[in-house]
Amino acid sequence: MLFLLSGCAPIPHFERISPEVEGIVLNKNTPVPNALVSVINEDNIKKTMTDKDGKFHIDEAYKFHFFKVFGDTGYKWELVIEHNGKTYLGMEELILGPARDYVSTECQIDTEEMLKKRNRLKYIPDYYGICY
């Protein structure tokens, strides 16, 4: 009873804290091979390199909780790209509750080209950087 009044209960579980992310990194619409792509959250960093076609894939991340908090917990994750000595914030997301399952994205590290594409979109979420 005391646990329920405190807003939590001892229910061991895993909660998704960052989604599965796949996409492509482009520079002036040309694939960027060998760029380092990272998904960063409060507990870990998952990294991969883009392949010869500029494509990448990173699996989701989970966090173990012994207590179940009733209500939504918040998580933040970021997609970061490193290439030729430059670091780009691809996107970031602050969410309540578990992270979404899956993100598919295109990341344009040539800022001018990215802005042209983004200007054609009707809705641009605040958490998107160079990826959309």
Image (cartoon, grey):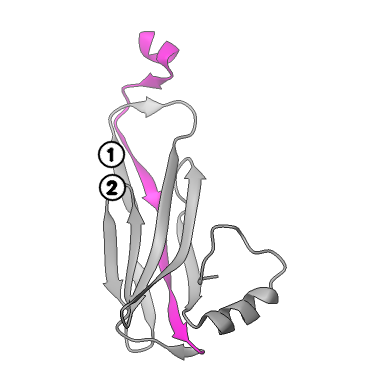
- Return the residue at label 2: 43
Residue farthest toward the top in the current orientation of the protein = 1
Identify which residue is drawn at 39% across, 21% down: 8
Disc 1: which residue: 64
Give the residue drawn at x 52%, y 66%: 129
Quarter of the view holding residue 36:
bottom left
The three-letter code of the residue at mark 1 reads: Phe
- Residue 47, image x and y in percent? 28, 66
Image coords of residue 7 (percent x, y): 43, 19
From this view, report whether residue 119 is shown above or below residue 79. below
Is residue 115 visible in the rendered image? The answer is yes
Q: In this view, does 114 lie to the left or right of 90?
A: right
Name the residue nearer the viewer: 115 or 10. Answer: 115
Residue 103 at what x, y percent from top left? 48, 63
Asked whether 14 or 6 is in front, the reply is 6
Helix, strand or loop for disc 1: strand
Q: Is residue 15 magenta?
A: yes
Q: Which three-letter amino acid code belongs to the residue tagged 2?
A: Asp
Q: Which of marks 2 and 1 is in front?
A: 2
- In the image, which residues are magenta? 1-28
Query: Could you tell me if residue 19 is visible in this image?
Result: no
